[in-house]
Image (spheres, rainbow, N blue to C red):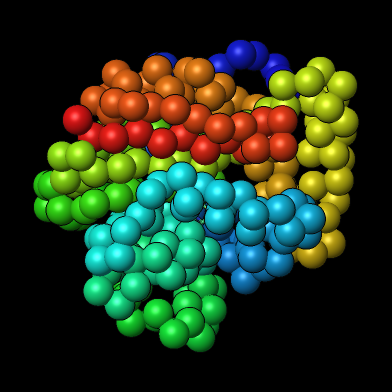
Amino acid sequence: MTPTKANNFQNQEETAYFGYRRVPAGEKGRLVRKHFTTVAARYDLMNTLLSLGLHHLWKRTAVKMLGLKPGDRVLDVCGGTGDLALLAARIVGRAGRVLIYDINRAMLAAGRPKVARSPLAGSILYLQGDAERLSCADNIFDAAMVGFGIRNLTRPDAGFREMHRVLKPGGRLMCLEFSQPTWAWFRWLYDLYSFYFMPLAGRIVAGSSQAYTYLPESIRLFAKPGELSALLEDLGFSQVRYRRLINGIAAVHVGVKS
Ligand SMILES: C[S@@+](CC[C@H](N)C(=O)[O-])C[C@H]1O[C@@H](n2cnc3c(N)ncnc32)[C@H](O)[C@@H]1O
């Protein structure tokens, strides 16, 4: 089902993948923004439906792996509707801060009522902007995380480089992202599910089958856990390790800014 083995980190000057389509690099950001504007209102519902609720568990596992402490300053890149930020806020508490950073106003707006209901809403801040050019000073965060977001960037390496820049020395990175099952038979089932059920559910629930065709395609073209670890090490993160979730449907990477 994958037309070519593409590497998101190569040949990024002129073109980028949007799903299986090669588009001018400048065009990808616009298409991604349109995609999330289309799905924003139903984003949380679709996540729960498509993952059978497992995304909540994956997010808890991922935030736990980040090793946060009370009082920490945390950046949630591509934070969307704020699930990871809410989990982080529970740990960093009132003395800490979590900044949700996302380019899409509709996604931020969709998550605001949920965040506002939390007793820790006062610890959560918002900033709308591009993850590839964070409008934050150098060396200010204790931890930075990105959940299901890095795959959507035109230049994922630029996003990681920016996270590295804004982390304090010794600051911790976490990346939770979809990947692919390691067992061939499970991958085959997962492909069937992804390429037939996901677009159908997207059409019925979110009003767009196209949006949920982009999702499995972009997952298939994204770097494998080993490749992602190598990239993070190249970018200056140390102690990089990863954990596969449900045989690799998702993977959590963590690392430390040396
Ligand atoms: C799949 S959602 C993930 C939301 C949330 N982190 C979660 O785990 O549910 C991806 C998010 O990345 C955001 N995004 C995509 N490109 C971005 C960019 N260049 N800069 C900042 N955010 C971006 C989208 O607007 C969207 O909210």
Residue appearing at x 68%, y 57% in the figure: 47
The furthest residue to the left:
138
Q: In which image quadrant can residue 257 be found? A: top left
Residue 33 in the image: x percent, y percent?
48, 54
Q: Is residue 20 left or right of residue 121?
A: right
Quadrant where the N terminus lies?
Answer: top right
| Residue 22 visible in rendering | no
Residue appearing at x 81%, y 30% in the figure: 191
Q: Is residue 192 left or right of residue 35?
A: right
The number of numbered discs placed on residues in the rendered structure image is 0
Q: In which image quadrant can residue 178 be found? A: top right
Q: Is residue 239 left or right of residue 39?
A: left
Quadrant where the C terminus lies?
Answer: top left
Q: Is residue 225 above or below residue 44?
A: above
| Residue 175 visible in rendering | yes
Residue appearing at x 72%, y 30% in the figure: 247
Pick whichever, 127 or 163, lies toward us. Answer: 163
Residue 126 in the image: x percent, y percent?
33, 70
Pick whichever, 252 or 111, lies toward us. Answer: 252
Residue 225 in the image: x percent, y percent?
53, 24
Residue 38 in the image: x percent, y percent?
61, 61
Residue appearing at x 28%, y 28% in the figure: 237
